[in-house]
Image: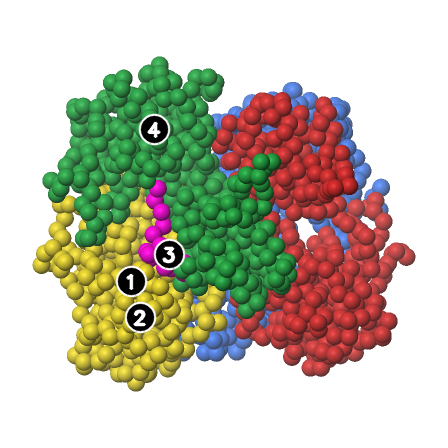
Chain colours: A yellow, B green, C red, D blue
Amino acid sequence: MPLSGQIVRCPSLGDAAFRSPLAGNGCSGCVPDDLWIRNSVETTAEDLLFEKAGPREKIYFDPLATKAAIVTCGGLCPGLNDVIRSVFLELAMNYGVREVVGIRYGYQGLNPQAGVPPVRLTPDMVESIHREGGTILGSSRGQQEPAVMVDFLQQQGINILFTVGGDGTQRGSLKIYEEIARRGLKIAIVGIPKTIDNDIPYCDGAHAESKGVPYGIGLVKVMGRDAGFIAAAATVASQDVNFALVPESSFALDGECGLLPLLRKRMIDRRHAVIVVAEGAGQELFQTHSLHRDASGNVKYEDIGPFLKQHILNYFTNHGPKVDVKYIDPSYIIRSVPANSDDSILCDRFARHAVHAAMAGKTGVLIGHLSSRFVHVPIAMLSGQKRRLPLDGDLWRAVLAATGQPREMR
Amino acid sequence: MPLSGQIVRCPSLGDAAFRSPLAGNGCSGCVPDDLWIRNSVETTAEDLLFEKAGPREKIYFDPLATKAAIVTCGGLCPGLNDVIRSVFLELAMNYGVREVVGIRYGYQGLNPQAGVPPVRLTPDMVESIHREGGTILGSSRGQQEPAVMVDFLQQQGINILFTVGGDGTQRGSLKIYEEIARRGLKIAIVGIPKTIDNDIPYCDGAHAESKGVPYGIGLVKVMGRDAGFIAAAATVASQDVNFALVPESSFALDGECGLLPLLRKRMIDRRHAVIVVAEGAGQELFQTHSLHRDASGNVKYEDIGPFLKQHILNYFTNHGPKVDVKYIDPSYIIRSVPANSDDSILCDRFARHAVHAAMAGKTGVLIGHLSSRFVHVPIAMLSGQKRRLPLDGDLWRAVLAATGQPREMR
Amino acid sequence: MPLSGQIVRCPSLGDAAFRSPLAGNGCSGCVPDDLWIRNSVETTAEDLLFEKAGPREKIYFDPLATKAAIVTCGGLCPGLNDVIRSVFLELAMNYGVREVVGIRYGYQGLNPQAGVPPVRLTPDMVESIHREGGTILGSSRGQQEPAVMVDFLQQQGINILFTVGGDGTQRGSLKIYEEIARRGLKIAIVGIPKTIDNDIPYCDGAHAESKGVPYGIGLVKVMGRDAGFIAAAATVASQDVNFALVPESSFALDGECGLLPLLRKRMIDRRHAVIVVAEGAGQELFQTHSLHRDASGNVKYEDIGPFLKQHILNYFTNHGPKVDVKYIDPSYIIRSVPANSDDSILCDRFARHAVHAAMAGKTGVLIGHLSSRFVHVPIAMLSGQKRRLPLDGDLWRAVLAATGQPREMR
Amino acid sequence: MPLSGQIVRCPSLGDAAFRSPLAGNGCSGCVPDDLWIRNSVETTAEDLLFEKAGPREKIYFDPLATKAAIVTCGGLCPGLNDVIRSVFLELAMNYGVREVVGIRYGYQGLNPQAGVPPVRLTPDMVESIHREGGTILGSSRGQQEPAVMVDFLQQQGINILFTVGGDGTQRGSLKIYEEIARRGLKIAIVGIPKTIDNDIPYCDGAHAESKGVPYGIGLVKVMGRDAGFIAAAATVASQDVNFALVPESSFALDGECGLLPLLRKRMIDRRHAVIVVAEGAGQELFQTHSLHRDASGNVKYEDIGPFLKQHILNYFTNHGPKVDVKYIDPSYIIRSVPANSDDSILCDRFARHAVHAAMAGKTGVLIGHLSSRFVHVPIAMLSGQKRRLPLDGDLWRAVLAATGQPREMR
């Protein structure tokens, strides 16, 4: 029984009525509905609780009468095909669902005007897809009208929709869920997050390049529009980075402890440097240091990578020595590799938990991974929240230790 | 404040008295000593609490007067050099410890009779070691006399010893710790576990081999003397395995649901199969099915890999069809590769937390990783406990789903 | 015009009569039939000449009336799927051949008794196969009766057969070719050799293992039944090997310059060693040093890897010091990886040249690669010839330089 | 004996007088000075002959009195550290040369004004460098004054200089050689070419990205300022490329068979496309299609990658459909990885042949690789020659087959 009032329960379609085929088949791991997982293991943290994910003994949808669909949205990342494959296999092989379709090109495929009808998935079709990058279904960015998409789900007789994607995708899922609730339909929506923390070995290249020439600077842009997790991980993994720039920690270009003077000091002492910059870092600099303004004199928002490269070149042209900046932007390469083993395992588990949730009649939930447990997180709780790198935590401290950069650069 | 009496606190050398150089240097992440981490996030689990790891504001050892040592023990695994490097760098660069030595060839190097004196570590020596597999210090299996080792630590003036290794190594640490306590010495011992969960892509090879010939069987032995985590992970990651054999789940060779009849059924239906076997699986079969007995008729304990290969060949010779078994034992290859990015990050964090613990005067503790938090685990609590794969948990369920094998094979 | 009488011309089915679709489509690279390639660029070598491979302006088979087949034989190696794919695409897309079938499980698939009928290849089927190891058609070792196979080719109406495999396979091709010639049939046979020179990075593992323990010896067995090319390449590529043992250079175990005393000297000086042994090396030792004899006292032929491991252990048990031998046999792992880029390119070119040859009516030929040129080699010329590593050549000198081993070990 | 008058012999310092330590040590592979290698194996080609590389029985330099130097110049590529290591080891271990120095940062290190003195190489220093990318010596582009560099060589008492680099570097070598000849000094210069043909797997990423979105275009820029070998190899290796653009084959953007209309046709038919463009392709388009002109209206030369991306976007904006172009520029990443096995072997052999040449008193030569043989190529013969991809050869035909693009795009 939950300990306090902050508990959240995900709404459902009504009571689950069917006995699960997994329960009948020796499913000793069935999870009761009143098992709760704490959001945090710290004793000082508030007791926010989540429903534990896992197969239920009773399920809501009759497998033989169920039609499920899966859609992948937003930018590519490793593991999308793993998720598609495991969702299909869990539905078809373990629950006995007979019809599973793939929606093409993200939410566009839920709008009949896009002219890309769903494709029926089969065991042959998914057999080897986990060894290739990308998504066999295609993807797209952006939303479609919820009413149009729910019309389409009704038309197609779809009972369950799995939405694979990041924050934007899940905001879309929430709107679909709300429209379904408004119409009182018996359609479940379960979200599956994307994992993008694949290997980032490219700082080695930057390191070799920076050391390979006199006064060489390797500048690597990595993913992370809102958070610096990937930049931090790449930094700690490579141990060759001298400056890690993340959205959470703003920095100045000039001034005694600004990036450029610190970089110059390093270049004079050591003759080479590696900088990793998250794509969302330093946005505040565009206002003050923009190199480009439009006709009306407004700041043009820019790509932080080339922006930094240009400012570094300008600074060293003025102050010496002459530096050689190698700019590396590996994003599309990283995004489209197949998942590594760790990611594959995680994707398989997210996918199968999503199926357990949906078959049990959970809806409007996203599968979450909290302290090594899988849970049901109401999608509504996500709104506006972004996970950010805590600057007083372990990982950032490891970044400071690996780089030697000061805590404040301004 | 802890919630209940099951709390454990690690003993210490006395009060920490020095202000940490990290605290002076903007260490906004210093951890107070009364922060507790729950062992489990499940609300139904008992409240076993552990001290949170991290840098303390006050430290016990004066960095300028401290001599630290590090030893790597047992079999190789990826990341040992990462740990050595990060322990050295955290001690030398962040705490200002001036003398750090590496003990050669495991606990042998703490016995003067082995004739392998410690080597003094320097920044140049460790600069690139994380890009190579193995351990620059060497390793060895087995124990040395605690009294001999503590004599050596005293002789050498070593104040802190970091022991990197698995269960056997940590049992050795405990004996050293107890001997130190008996003598009332001011020497801290902090253990660092080994991570062996590196990528295991070799099932792909087994799959290709098994499909490449008529009636092909790929048989892969993976690490795991006491637990099947690696076998399970390899199975879920590759999605090509048909039978996963682990120590936690005993199985019969014969009988209706025994491995061999099930394998034969699969061969007739699909003409190829992949089996992954943990090295500790099926030990109970040696008693009943041993192919080799010694002169007195006693069972000779055997390697499960060749044992299974032979039984499979015998069985199909008798019952048909003729099969072609490819046996793959990739253990030494996996063990000696450099750490991948995920492992590198983990090793760095384990290493730096061990330094924080030791400098703060914690001793007799192992750095643990619980629900994404690092904690201090009293080594004494480890005794006799082995982590085993729960057969009613997510991961095993994912194995059953990926293989299609029955829950009981007997 | 050829310079001398050593010229070989491959026999053919008669004159080519059709204009090639490639010629019609801007095939500026069509090769005339009287272009000759020297076997050797050395001016001291005899002038053995081969026909240059490449598309011909006139072809023998009418694409619209042609049915082609492809068979993969023998052990797996990287690139088999690349070859299948490129043969199919060249036939279907460039020549317009409408029917291409894959023979299943090597020569077994040409014997109706095996019960594995050919499978018709399609663009969809081959689209992604080059990214997977193994062969989608399956393979097998050993021969079938030529008369049976030729009956089958006639029955199925097959006009062209591509045989992919090593020496044994090509001896089989020759028998099929001779049977066809005897019957006067209009069926062309073109062989495609297997490339097995894939990356062999596993000596790094052996090196790490050997240095990781006191007196560690890494012993790695690599492919090479008759020749030491792979052992030599692995040695030069890794630069960590101390003894490279190949079939071309016999060696003694004992005696002043025997392997075991030399190995002991190295162990005393440097405490670790890496040995690479080709599977065909040291066969002459079995006679004199066999550890196993059968009931009648005859030598049992053995696997050189475990044989060496045991002799090393015995020797050091007697003479000290105590060594730790890690034996690594990566063969099945190497064999079943997908081709790397270099291999992929080579496979594509072998495959397309085989198609050009067959369509032009060449038969009884194997595609060869001589001094960076592709040529037609009459299969009959292969008989009994094995390529062996020249002990006075560059590569072996590079091995001696990399290892420091003496030229004679006996 | 050479067959005709087109023979070239490299000039030398005078007769070799010392017996080689390799000859004394069982060098059964010593090469006499009158062994000639044909430039081409085609019987129709002219008989241009080159001296065969390899150790000589007599050498010119007394190893005990020789000081050698090595310099790496130009952009990074895989294998530079392999070359440095093998040159050092062959000199020190096999010839017994006692002093080998590394010149820092390319030709800059031969100019005392740069303030980067040579570093003395030792076995410890080079032991593991072949496992890292880049060059431990650093590199730089551009030339220094020959007189200044030769002054420096004299000052430092250097007898042999190895220059590792591409065409520009070798033009520099030639000037140094000519200055040495003018002064009549006993200093040998031997060039070693760079190999840049490392694995290029990044087209897979482009393929996944292009298929991952509706109307996706993956655009990958690869190295190749003057020649399309890398673009062609990447195309044939990946088999996923639809347009390969190389410097040797000019193309139009517009017009019936121009790139943009053909690309549009493909997008409408198949909805995705991958384009590989060598950095030197399409230079002629800047004149006619430049998007940027300077203040005086002159064409600004541009980077072909972003240039193509912009023209594609403009074209589809006007003609539809809306496409999504992912631009990938992996150059710095590819350049700085360690060498793969094939490259390592090649680098080792180039390096050791360069040492044999220099010790035997060859000078003004570059080590060449002709039809699987190593030869001495007079550097003077290189001037102005660039190797270009033959458009009527095998490789380009394989590109056309793999892409399906027309031979002429204009």
Q: The residue tagged with tag 3: helix, strand or loop?
A: helix
Q: Is residue A99 magenta?
A: no
Where, quadrant-wise, is the C terminus of chain A in this rendering? top left
Query: Which residue does the numbered mark 3 point to in the structure image?
Result: B396
Callouts 2 and 1 close, C-beta under 8 Å: yes
Q: Which mark is residue A30?
A: 1
- Confirm whether circles 2 and 1 share one chain: yes
Residue sitting farthest toward the right = C5
Q: Chain of mark 3?
A: B
Dot in front, 2 or 4: 2
Query: Measuring 15% from the left and 45% from the top, which residue is drawn there?
Result: A43
Q: Indicate left or right for B267 with D269 as reference.
A: right
Q: Which residues are magenta?
A: B386-400
- Confirm whether circles 3 and 1 share one chain: no
Q: Is residue B391 magenta?
A: yes
Residue sitting farthest toward the top = B155
Three-letter residue code for mark 4: Ser
Query: Measuring 62% from the left and 63% from the top, which residue is drawn there?
Result: B320
Callouts 3 and 4 close, C-beta under 8 Å: no
Q: The residue tagged with tag 4: helix, strand or loop?
A: helix
Question: Badge 1, how many Cα within 10 Å: few under 14, some, many 20+?
Answer: many
**Location of residue D264 with respect to D76 vertically, above or below:** below
Q: Nearer the viewer, residue C234 or B332?
A: B332
Query: Which residue does the numbered mark 2 point to in the structure image?
Result: A20
Query: Measuring 39% from the left and 21% from the top, which residue is drawn there?
Result: B145
Residue sitting farthest toward the front = B296
- Confirm whether circles 3 and 2 share one chain: no
Query: Which residue does the numbered mark 4 point to in the structure image?
Result: B173
